[in-house]
Amino acid sequence: MDINKKDDGAKSGNVAQTGGSGSGSGNMVAPGTGGAVQIPRDAFEANTKAYFDNLHAKDKATK
C-alpha cells in the first residue's frame, strides 16, 4: 500500500450520512456528542444557533 495515497473511504466527521435523501431529512449525529446522540436533521438545520447555545450552556454548567 502506498502511504502517500489518501484513503477516501475513511473520512472523518461527526455527521451521519442518511441514505440518498439529501440534506434536510433523516437523522444526524448531534455535534459535540462524540456520536452518542442522534437528532433530527430538520430540527438542527432550522435553528443551529439555539442548538449550540444550549450545548455550550450545558458545558458551562458542568464546569
Image (cartoon, rainbow, N blue to C red):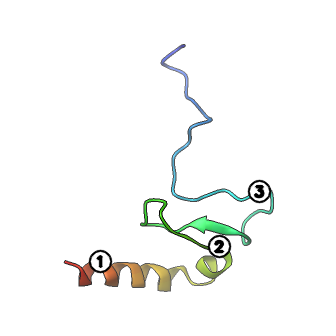
Q: Residue furthest left?
A: 63
**Mark 3 vs 1, N-terminal side:** 3
Which amino acid type corresponds to the residue marked 1 in the rendered image?
A: Asp
Quadrant location of the N terminus? Answer: top right
**12 lies above or below 35:** above
Q: Position of residue 45 (x, y in %)?
A: 62, 77
Q: On the picture, is 30 further left or further right than 43?
A: left
Residue found at the far top of this picture: 1
Tag shown at residue 19: 3
Crowdedness of circle 3 by 10 Å Cα count: few (<14), some, many (20+)? few
Disc 3 to disc 2, how far (Cα)? 13 Å
Q: Decide which of tag 3 and tag 2 comes sooner along the chain.
A: 3
Amino acid type of the residue tagged 3 in the rendering: Gly
User: Quadrant of the rendered structure where residue 8 is?
Assistant: top right
Q: Secondary structure at mark 1?
A: helix
Quarter assignment of residue 63 = bottom left
Read off the residue under disc 1. Answer: 59
User: At which x and y percent is residue 26?
Assistant: 71, 69
In front of the other: 39 or 5: 39
Q: Amino acid at mark 2?
A: Arg
Relative to 31, is 27 on the left or the right? Answer: right
Q: Residue at x 56, y 42 (%)?
A: 11
Distance from Cα at disc 1 to Cα at disc 2: 22 Å
Query: Marks 3/1: CA distance?
Result: 32 Å
Q: Which residue is mark 2?
A: 41
Q: State left or right for residue 57 relative to residue 33.
A: left
Residue name at image x 43 percent, y 66 percent: 33
Label total for image: 3
Density class for disc 2 (Cα within 10 Å; few <14, some 14-19, many ≥20) is: some
